[in-house]
Image: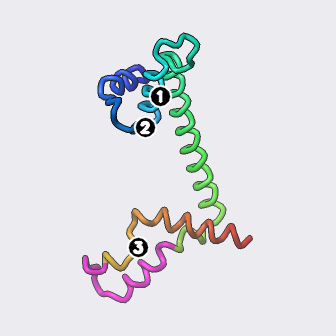
Amino acid sequence: MVDKLVTEHKRTWVPDQSPRDPTAAFLAEMEKAKGNPESSFNDANVHLVVLDLFGAGIVTSSVTLTWGLLLTILHVDVQSQPDRGWNERRRRVEAPSLRLLGTLVAPSNGLTQTLKEYNRKLTTL
């Protein structure tokens, strides 16, 4: 997988443009260090750096989801906060309507609202 990613970056990399991601930045440094046998910017290290970044992203996502689940379990009352506005407005109207969509907390925004509520609650402890 990493070989495929690095090969694709080498194929599409444009040296004159600013790097689009860490892999492209590493390739730019490899180009600058060409001919220097002591440089750590080489093919072997680009694979290691990509693997390290991938692993760091997995760990970050895993820890974030674990804490989110733990906080949701421990503070069930916080989870209901984003839905409160939706439920109150929905009760006032006989039938759901698309015109209400702009005034309500969207389901995709629910996670953001929940995290804000957790942050507010944790800072008051």
Q: Are marks 2 and 1 in contact (CB under 8 Å)?
A: no
Name the foreground residue: 54 vs 106.
Answer: 54
Residue 25 locus on image (x, y percent): 45, 32
> Which quadrant would the N terminus be assigned to in this image?
top left
First in residue order: circle 2 vs circle 1 = 2
Q: How crowded is mark 1: few (under 14 residues within 10 Å), some or many (20 or more)?
A: some
Choose mark 1 or mark 3, whichever is in front: 1
Q: Identify which residue, 95 or 113, lies in the foreground.
A: 113
Q: Mark 1 points at which residue?
A: 26
Q: Is residue 96 magenta?
A: yes
Which residue does the numbered mark 3 point to in the structure image?
A: 105
Secondary structure found at label 2 = loop
The answer for how far apart the CA atoms under marks 2 and 1 are is 9 Å
In the picture as drawn, the residue positioned furthest to the left comes out as: 98
Name the main secondary structure of what is drawn in magenta: helix
The residue mark sitting in front, 2 or 3, is 2
Residue extent of the magenta highlight: 82-100
For the residue marked with disc 2, what is the amino acid? Asp
- Is residue 28 positioned above or below 66 on the image? above
Alpha carbon distance from label 1 to label 3: 42 Å
| Residue 77 falls inside the magenta stretch | no
Residue 100 image position (x, y, % from top left): 30, 80
- Name which residue type carries label 3: Val
Disc 2: which residue: 21
Image-based side of 103 in relation to 62, left or right: left
Q: Which of marks 1 and 3 is nearer the N terminus?
A: 1
Residue that appears at 48% across and 26% down = 29
Residue type pointed to by label 1:
Phe
